[in-house]
């Protein structure tokens, strides 16, 4: 095993400048891809864990202010951050955090305009939740497209190194007038290493890209469902508040 590693190192060190450049470029793609994979894995794992904690607390709590206090503690949860945005927008409608008006209408004719104005206020909350959901989705997908770029381009970069190595082999045959293994082997070895390096960079990147995209799309649905449920709670409180006016 040690001798094989030494042979590979010797082949790389004795490779031509173009093949070395190709290998360095593939090394850059590989290191960057693995760094992104580690960061995204930790980010998504924390997002799922803390969002599950917050969602469970949210449905068990009876006061939105308690859920808001819990959301501020779970800073790694996208759902908690979306809720904070919606709750802050809700507080702008009423300092108490409730949608019921402080002054009851004086007549039944005044009740409908009051109810309509409160429903109109939920449009601001809906827009804030939609904007927050889009921002969280964008943040989750940051750097992930680089994995797709790595998976799509590195095999061709490696193939370029392969073609270049074969060209060197034929060039050596032409100079020495011999097609012996000693003449052909160095160029072929360079070509095979470039091909292997390209595949080694591409395969993990493609697998990770598909995995993260699936996780992100699933989480996006969870964000949209939570936003819809939160709006339903607010609108139900508005209807209940009508009877209490």
Image (tube, rainbow, N blue to C red):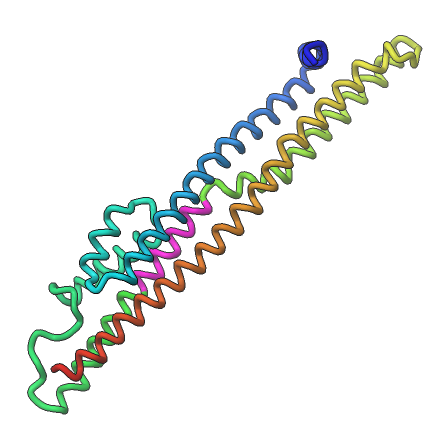
What is the quadrant of residue 233 in the picture?
Answer: bottom left
Is residue 70 shown above or below 228? above
Q: Position of residue 84 (x, y in %)?
A: 25, 55
What is the quadrant of residue 163 in the picture?
Answer: top right
Please report the residue visible at 13 percent of the width from the left and 87 percent of the height from the top: 110
Q: Position of residue 188 (x, y in %)?
A: 80, 20
Magenta stretch, overall SS: helix
Please report the residue visible at 45 percent of the width from the left and 43 percent of the height from the top: 142
Please report the residue visible at 43 percent of the width from the left and 38 percent of the height from the top: 42
The magenta stretch spans residue 138:
yes
Part of the protein shown in magenta: 127-141
Is residue 118 shown above or below 156? below
186 sits to left or right of 125: right
74 sits to left or right of 45: left
Q: Position of residue 150 (x, y in %)?
A: 59, 36
Is residue 116 shown above or below 24? below
Is residue 3 shown above or below 197? above
Quarter occupied by the N terminus: top right
The magenta stretch spans residue 35:
no
26 sits to left or right of 42: right
57 sits to left or right of 207: left
Please report the residue visible at 13 percent of the width from the left and 81 percent of the height from the top: 244
What is the quadrant of residue 18 in the picture?
Answer: top right
């Amino acid at each position: 095993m040690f001798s094989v590693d030494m042979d590979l190192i010797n082949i790389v060190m004795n490779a031509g400048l173009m093949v070395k450049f190709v290998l360095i470029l593939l090394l850059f793609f590989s290191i960057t891809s693995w760094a992104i994979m580690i960061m995204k894995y930790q980010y998504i794992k924390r997002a799922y864990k803390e969002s599950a904690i917050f969602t469970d607390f949210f449905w068990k709590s009876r006061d939105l202010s308690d859920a808001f206090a819990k959301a501020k503690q779970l800073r790694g949860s996208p759902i908690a951050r979306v809720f904070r945005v919606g709750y802050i927008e809700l507080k702008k409608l009423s300092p108490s955090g409730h949608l019921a008006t402080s002054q009851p209408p004086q007549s039944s004719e005044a009740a409908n305009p009051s109810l309509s104005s409160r429903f109109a206020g939920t449009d601001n909350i809906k827009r804030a939740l939609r904007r927050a959901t889009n921002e969280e989705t964008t943040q989750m997908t940051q750097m992930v497209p680089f994995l797709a770029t790595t998976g799509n381009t590195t095999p061709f970069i490696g193939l370029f190194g392969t073609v270049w190595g074969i060209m060197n082999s034929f060039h050596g045959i032409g100079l020495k007038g011999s097609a012996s293994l000693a003449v052909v082997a160095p160029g072929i070895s360079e070509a095979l290493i470039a091909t292997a390096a390209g595949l080694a960079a591409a395969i993990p990147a493609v697998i990770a890209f598909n995995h993260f995209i699936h996780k992100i799309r699933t989480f996006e649905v969870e964000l949209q469902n939570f936003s819809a449920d939160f709006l339903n709670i607010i609108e139900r409180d508005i209807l209940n508040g009508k009877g209490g006016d």
